[in-house]
Image: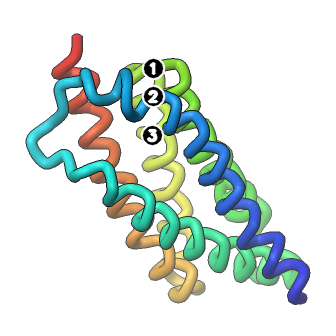
Amino acid sequence: MIIKLIISLVIPLLIGFLGSLATQSSISSWYVTLNKPLLNPPSWVFAPVWSLLYIMIGINLYLLWQKFLAKKIDKKTFQLFIIQIVLNGLWSPIFFGLKSPFFSLIIILSLLITLIMIAKQLYQKHKLNFYLLLPYIAWVSFASYLNLGIFILNL
């Protein structure tokens, strides 16, 4: 049980760490040259917000993994949760590594749609999982706005 919790926490934190490697290489060079939308927060905001969200994603993963093994959630919901982790992990290397606001916009909108699908699945029977997802959905919605703004303002 504790091993599953550790694995569940390490997976999103590792994805976040790997994404930060792609981010660091571009944050002080390419990213600073971009035109950004009006509500763009200072760069220091992103690390603490994402760290907290990755911990919440890990806790949610653990709870869903337990429910999946106990057959309390369906395979589709669990698979969607894994897919959203993969999409999350792809965004930073595509946005910062490939310097592609367009393709990263496709990724983040796919992530947002996947999160909404997961929330819809969890809402009725798994309230804690649903509530753990809400801050993540809110932040990804905001990040989608930022990504779209950067794409449009830098055509």
Foreground: disc 2 or disc 3: 2
The residue located at (32%, 59%) in the rendering is 45
Please name the residue that numbered disc 3 is placed on.
108
Image location of residue 74, percent across then percent down: 75, 69
Q: Nearer the viewer, residue 23 or 114?
A: 23
Q: Amino acid at mark 1?
A: Lys
Please name the residue that numbered disc 1 is placed on.
99
Tell me the quarter of the picture where residue 47 sits. bottom left
Image location of residue 67, percent across then percent down: 77, 82
The answer to the question of whether label 1 and label 2 lie on touching residues, with beta carbons closer than 8 A, is: yes
What colouring does the structure picture have? rainbow
Q: Amino acid at mark 2?
A: Ser
Please name the residue that numbered disc 2 is placed on.
26
Q: Quadrant of the C terminus?
A: top left
Q: Nearer the viewer, residue 138 or 122?
A: 138
The answer to the question of whether label 1 and label 3 lie on touching residues, with beta carbons closer than 8 A, is: no
Foreground: disc 1 or disc 2: 2
At mark 2, the secondary structure is helix
Q: Residues within 10 Å of mark 2 (few under 14, many from 20)?
A: some
